[in-house]
Image (spheres, rainbow, N blue to C red):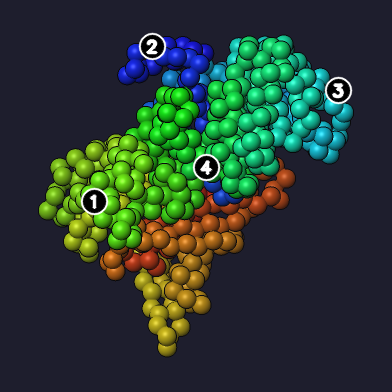
Amino acid sequence: MIKDREESLNMDEGEIDIQNRVIIFDTTLRDGEQSPGAALNVSEKVELAHKLEEMGIDVIEAGFPVSSPGDFRAVQQISREIRDCVVCGLTRAHRKDIDAAAAALEDAARPRIHTGLGVSDSHIFHKLRTTREEALERGVEAVKYARRFVDDVQYYAEDAGRADPEYLYRVLEAVITAGATVVNIPDTTGYTSPGEFGALIRSIVENVPNVDRATISVHCHNDLGMATANTLAGLLNGARQVEVTVNGIGERAGNCSLEEVVMALRTRQDLFGLRTGVDTRRIYPVSRLVSTLTGIPVQPNKAIVGANAFAHSSGIHQDGVLKERTTYEIIDPRDIGVPDSEIILSARSGRAGLRHRLTELGYTLDDDQFEKVYGRFLEVADKKKTVDTRDLEAIVNDEARVFFDETYHLEQVQVSCGDRSIPTATVHIRGPDGQSICDADHGTGPVDAVCRAIDRVIGESNELTEFSVQAVTEGIDAVGSVTIRIQAEDPVRENGNERRVFSGRGSDTDIVVASAKAYMFALNRLIAARREAERLAKT
Ligand code: KIV
Ligand code: ZN
């Protein structure tokens, strides 16, 4: 399957050496989405899948179909729309999981089932409560069963980083004999060091007799901050598929980050001698999109995509870069698609100027979305006089990146506060029946007062767990971007007890208004999820 894609890849340097081609397996939509509060809805996942496809990702792990109706529908929809990538669904080594994955992947051009179970004694004895032999047998059965539905079956040997290598070799040999096309070696707990992990991959190459019939994949977690180093060590020792997420999001400390591995391979081609099919100029826009959709900010000093990754603050460094960029920069920001922030617009730029700039930045908006963005653009231009790329990004995220029906719409917010007064907020909210409701409340501060006033109108029980403000641009008149997380009863879980996190975002030159928008966003998302759960329960 991958071979077909490789043969069709149009690479500069003539003949492609398949041995040197690294397959990029993106699991942002599965492992990445397991980050607390990152939950995406189906439309958001489909939009992201398209961006990953445009970027040249080889395999998209679109979800875990048996885990929830939403995950099933996301895998199904992505299978229907994505043509240039392998689409993969995760399962445990259970027939019902594999049935669900096979059904969700039915329309995929290139379906892959990713099944497996634990191989460390800790997983076998404590989690699975079984024996090594039985676990091996279950794994083999799962692969054989999955092969009834698809030709491409990937096997994960969970917690391989802490397993007895001799047992691991036996499991891998058996599942390859049973039909696995890819064997995934996860360092599930992020426990290993690069030297150890590289040696483990080398030992698999040397000790699993039929390993040449499968691709070795590496899946490293970042608990000790070594996910990227371990992944690269895996490649140096024979792995040819890497499992990564955009911005490194994922369980606990996250997964290996896509942008770090891809840029390490590209920047140090001399060292690794390996290549990917990724269009690196898509890295930055996709990183921004993932951060926007998940509500997980990128830390400023994050390698490759952090806000400071190309900032030079000391005079000596600035001087060096001005004289010759490569003095202190090993990557040209344009190679990862960092937009030119020098280009600014003003109210006089008009519709045509705004449309042109949005197109340059890779946004395709329909007419309705464009009109909303234009209206907000004029408001911001009026307040700030000039609007740069980051302001525009914040406006588009607010106005054109809402993938659910807004049940309640914030029409107006007014706050009174100060060191001698009780913070009080009044809000006007349009409800589902089109009526505008006005209410007011006070709080410990202006944001608290606004949230309480909104609660009086909407009445959705929840707990606000996180609130963060970031300036989108520099200066006192900057647009502020607020991210809010709320916790509420999960509408999808059948037992009704589990809580789920919903994130919301909003931006404005007034951070109290931005906070009100972010809170409304999270509440509308919660209400949309509840509606969807009710709809699914009826079908
Ligand atoms: O970390 C892990 O082991 C996993 C597997 C399910 C592949 O995510
Ligand atoms: Zn994982």
Q: Quadrant of residue 513?
A: bottom left
Label 4, label 2: how many angstroms apart (C-alpha)? 32 Å
| Residue 526 at x, y percent in the picture | 54, 51
Q: Nearer the viewer, residue 323 or 342?
A: 323
Quick one: label 2, few (<14), some, or many (20+) residues within 10 Å?
few
* Labels 4, 2: front one: 2
Q: Residue at x 46, y 83 (%)?
A: 422
Q: Can you identify the residue that label 4 sits on?
A: 248
Q: Is mark 3 within 8 Å of ligand 1?
A: no
Quick one: quadrant of the C terminus? top right
Q: Can you identify the residue that label 2 sits on?
A: 15
| Residue 26 at x, y percent in the picture | 52, 31
Whichever of callouts 2 and 3 sits on the residue coming sooner in the sequence is: 2
Label 1, label 3: how many angstroms apart (C-alpha)? 63 Å
Q: Can you identify the residue that label 1 sits on?
A: 322
Q: Can you identify the residue that label 3 sits on?
A: 133
Q: Nearer the viewer, residue 513 or 457?
A: 513
Element type at mark 3: helix
Whichever of callouts 1 and 3 sits on the residue coming sooner in the sequence is: 3
Element type at mark 1: helix
The answer to whether the residue labelled 4 contacts the one labelled 2, judged by CB atoms less than 8 Å apart, is no
Q: Amino acid at mark 4?
A: Gly
| Residue 469 at x, y percent in the picture | 43, 62
Q: Amino acid at mark 3?
A: Glu
Q: Residue at x 52, y 42 (%)?
A: 248
Give the farthest residue toward the bottom. 420
Whichever of callouts 2 and 1 sits on the residue coming sooner in the sequence is: 2
Label 2, label 3: how many angstroms apart (C-alpha)? 45 Å
Element type at mark 4: helix
Label 2, label 1: how many angstroms apart (C-alpha)? 38 Å
